[in-house]
Image: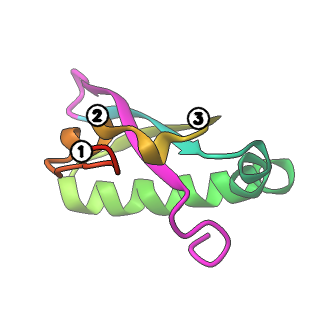
Amino acid sequence: LHQELPYELTVETENWEERDDGSVRIDQVIFVARDGHKGIVLGHKGETVKAIGQQARAEITEFLGRKVHLFLTVRVRANWLDEAERYGEMGLDFRDGNA
């Protein structure tokens, strides 16, 4: 999706749950800036987001060395790029034109 939505989507982890069997459940939201972008991320019949989830799950599983249950949701949040709070959560200093 980098060529279609290079800077207008972000992923946030809403829940990280350690399970008794040693696996982890991760709930993440893919935020896009416009409703039209949501369709691009979802793809036809959800095929694109399913492929994203499969690849991400494989990478996280390899990194953590244990089974991962990954659940992705796609939501529209207009102007998320302008939310200083989001940058602060990542340890970045956000300064808008008024600072």
* Residue 90 horizontal side relative to residue 57, left or right: left
**Which one is earlier in the sequence, the residue at label 1 or at label 2?**
2
Under tag 1, what secondary structure?
loop
- Residue holding disc 3: 77
Q: Quadrant of the N terminus?
A: bottom right
Residue 63 position (above or below residue 32): below
**Which one is earlier in the sequence, the residue at label 3 or at label 2?**
3
* Amino acid, disc 3: Arg
Return the residue found at the far right. Answer: 44
Q: Nearer the viewer, mark 3 or mark 1?
A: 1
Q: Quadrant of residue 99?
A: top left
Under tag 2, what secondary structure?
helix
* Amino acid, disc 1: Ala
Real-space CA distance between mark 3 and mark 2, rounded to the nearest whole angstrom: 14 Å
* Amino acid, disc 2: Glu
In this rendered view, identify the residue nearer to me: 30 or 55: 30
Under tag 3, what secondary structure?
loop
- The location of residue 22, given as percent across then percent down, is 20, 33
Question: Residue drawn at (46%, 50%), measured in percent from left and top?
Answer: 10
Return the residue found at the far front. Answer: 98
* Residue 76 horizontal side relative to residue 16, left or right: right
Report the span colored magenta: 1-22
